[in-house]
Image (spheres, rainbow, N blue to C red):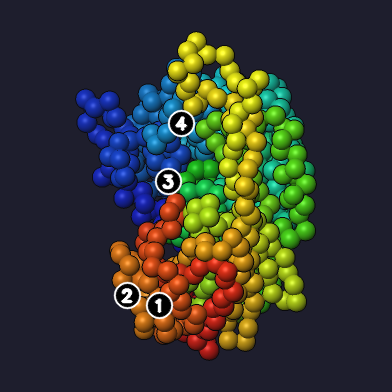
């Protein structure tokens, strides 16, 4: 049972944080908990506040070894004072990594502290009243910042709405609801298939989902749950057989990193009970298996179970999750229509301290057959990835000297059971600025380049470079056919990225630098724990070991294949007949 597992895990992490709390009362960080990465305590939802959630949950839970523990309570009191001391006069906090005097990071704290406040104040434990009062004071001091503060990223809006709803639930100030309505009137940034703008399966999907759940609850906006449902349904197709989440095309910092469903546990369990949905219950169960830490606020699974006791019981019978599927996410989304409207938005393609995320709604194909999992991607640095048991082909990249750099494929179409990817790049030259368009200058001998109206130049000698990939599943694995006709003599490189945990057996290869192998002839086999992926299709049509401006990721084994246009080249990928295990 997940609840009993979480009680033990929470107690373990309670003890772990003891040694990191600053107990020197001469220190300006007195009471805070040191962040292992920086050596400094921060008042953020992933650092000191996260520890506050662990400690509060243990103190209030009768099943915890720290229930009503006087030593832990004293430590929590010191920590709550630290939080107040590090709250700025304007009510905000600075999380330490960036975003100083940050309304959105304060909003993360507000949602989490609201949970802690409700847990402490409902416990009727008089010894905890001073901590509850500190938390209430912190929350009240955030109200001006949340009523006026702004954001950087798409998901920040929903965190702030959740915070405004949480504050409204406690203080009942109508202006909080009105401010949330202003944010919600912008509309939700999610495709019909359930993908949020940032395409962040490892982090920000779960952030948006849990915060919109609480916004829907406290602001009485049940329609917000439709987007939560859509994303949770989509995520059923974005988990590898070993429980790792697909992060190969993320638009945020989880890109290419290992994440599990653990942070989705609370929202899947909440929605399973709310909707009586067996599939959500099954995903909650899968997420519960992955939990090794209660989680950062407001996604702390222990706090959510204590605040919502009904979640502790398996009242919804889980369904069987699909293990065989072919799914195109955003295949029917008219992305080009929305992109065509970007110019009329008026921002001229620029946004400060954030990204416009034009890759929003780009199609992704997912295949699962038992323990084999494949992803075909657009608008990502890789266009293909394959997992087979313990064998991980983390990605396949293509780059050329035309632009130069990594080729990002823009289109994905399914034809006769195969996927056709297309990338098109245009590049030309620019003539002189017409005399009538030149700026006035005090001196004809001094004309800074950055002051010239470059957009007035006319294009000359424009060239078009198109690259196509046909990815097709076979009985033995996959084939990847790469084509590019012109211009002629474009240096191109295909890079296969393998996990460092396995062994790459190579013939006809030579070192091309750290973690790089130039594949000139023969076949290669990548093997790990009895599972293998074998590839044919070596080539050595030029000798460059790197394509300028191409990003070569660290922490993997890179197999390089050099091609030159015109290209019509096929890679045959085979996998071992049966994956040895499920991870």
What distance separates the C-alpha of mark 1 from that of mark 2? 8 Å
Q: Secondary structure at mark 4?
A: loop
Q: Residue at x 72, y 65 (%)?
A: 413
Please give the label number shown on residue 99.
4
Contact, mark 4 vs mark 1 (Cβ under 8 Å): no
What distance separates the C-alpha of mark 4 from that of mark 1? 48 Å
Residue 469: image quadrant is bottom right
Residue 376: image quadrant is bottom right
Q: Is residue 383 left or right of residue 185?
A: left
Residue 396 in percent (x, y) is at: 51, 67
Contact, mark 1 vs mark 2 (Cβ under 8 Å): yes
Q: Nearer the viewer, mark 4 or mark 2?
A: 2
Which residue is the site of mark 1?
Answer: 520
Which residue is the site of mark 2?
Answer: 510
Which residue is the site of mark 3?
Answer: 54
Q: Nearer the viewer, residue 202 or 546?
A: 546
Q: Nearer the viewer, mark 4 or mark 3?
A: 4
Q: Residue at x 64, y 40 (%)?
A: 459
What distance separates the C-alpha of mark 2 from that of mark 3? 51 Å
Lower sequence index among marks 1 and 2:
2
**Residue 507 in sight from this viewpoint:** yes
Q: In the figure, 532 relative to 224: above or below?
A: below
Q: Nearer the viewer, mark 2 or mark 3?
A: 2
Q: In the figure, 274 relative to 559: above or below?
A: above
What distance separates the C-alpha of mark 4 from that of mark 2? 45 Å
Residue 409 in percent (x, y) is at: 61, 58
Q: In the figure, 15 relative to 349: above or below?
A: below
Residue count near mark 3 (Cα–Cα under 10 Å), binned few <14, some 14–19, many ≥20: many
Lower sequence index among marks 4 and 3:
3
């Amino acid at each position: 049972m997940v609840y009993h597992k979480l009680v033990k895990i929470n107690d373990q992490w309670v003890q772990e944080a003891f040694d990191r709390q600053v107990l020197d009362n001469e220190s300006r960080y007195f009471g805070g908990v040191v962040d292992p990465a920086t050596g400094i305590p921060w008042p953020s939802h992933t650092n000191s506040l996260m520890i506050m959630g662990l400690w509060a949950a243990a103190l209030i839970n009768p099943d915890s070894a720290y229930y009503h523990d006087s030593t832990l309570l004293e430590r929590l009191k010191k920590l709550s004072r630290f939080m107040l001391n590090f709250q700025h006069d304007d009510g905000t906090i600075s999380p330490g990594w960036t975003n100083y005097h940050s309304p959105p990071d304060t909003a993360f704290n507000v949602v989490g502290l609201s949970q802690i406040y409700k847990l402490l104040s409902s416990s009727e434990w008089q010894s905890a009243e001073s901590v509850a009062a500190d938390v209430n004071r912190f929350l009240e001091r955030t109200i001006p910042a949340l009523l006026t503060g702004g954001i950087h990223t798409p998901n920040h809006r929903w965190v702030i709405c959740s915070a405004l709803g949480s504050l409204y639930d406690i203080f009942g100030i109508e202006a909080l609801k009105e401010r949330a309505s202003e944010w919600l009137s912008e509309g939700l940034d999610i495709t019909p298939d359930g993908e949020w703008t940032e395409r962040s399966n490892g982090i920000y999907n779960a952030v948006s989902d849990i915060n919109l759940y609480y916004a829907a609850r406290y602001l009485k906006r049940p329609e917000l749950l439709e987007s939560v449902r859509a994303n949770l349904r989509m995520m059923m197709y974005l988990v590898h057989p070993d429980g790792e989440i697909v992060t190969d095309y993320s638009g945020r910092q989880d890109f290419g990193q290992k994440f599990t469903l653990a942070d989705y546990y609370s929202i899947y369990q909440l929605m399973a009970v709310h909707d009586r949905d067996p599939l959500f219950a099954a995903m909650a169960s899968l997420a519960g298996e992955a939990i090794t830490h209660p989680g950062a606020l407001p996604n702390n699974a222990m706090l959510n179970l204590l605040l919502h006791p009904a979640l502790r019981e398996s009242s919804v019978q889980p369904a069987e999750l699909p293990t065989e599927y072919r799914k195109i996410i955003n295949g029917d989304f008219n992305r080009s229509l929305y992109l065509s409207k970007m110019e009329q938005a008026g921002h001229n393609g620029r946004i400060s301290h954030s990204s416009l995320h034009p890759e929003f709604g780009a199609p992704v194909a997912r295949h699962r057959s038992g323990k084999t999992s494949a992803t075909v991607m657009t608008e990502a640095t890789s266009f293909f990835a394959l997992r087979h048991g313990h064998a991980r082909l983390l990605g396949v990249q293509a780059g050329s000297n035309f632009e130069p750099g990594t080729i990002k494929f823009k289109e994905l179409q399914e034809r006769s059971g195969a996927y056709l990817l297309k990338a098109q790049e245009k590049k030309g030259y620019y003539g002189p600025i017409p005399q009538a368009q030149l700026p006035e200058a005090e001196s004809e001998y001094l004309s800074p380049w950055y002051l010239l109206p470059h957009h007035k130049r006319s294009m000359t000698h424009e060239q078009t470079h198109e690259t196509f990939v046909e990815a097709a599943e076979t009985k033995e694995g996959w084939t990847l056919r790469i084509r590019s006709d012109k211009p002629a003599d474009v240096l191109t490189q295909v890079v296969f990225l393998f996990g460092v945990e396995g062994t790459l057996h190579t013939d006809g290869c030579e070192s091309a630098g750290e973690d790089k192998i130039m594949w000139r002839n023969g076949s290669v086999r990548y093997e790990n724990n009895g599972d293998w992926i074998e590839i044919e299709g070596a080539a050595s049509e030029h000798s460059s070991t790197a394509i300028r401006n191409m990003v070569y990721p660290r922490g993997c084994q890179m197999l390089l294949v050099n091609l030159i246009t015109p290209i019509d080249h096929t890679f045959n990928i085979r996998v071992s007949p049966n994956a040895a295990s499920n991870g």
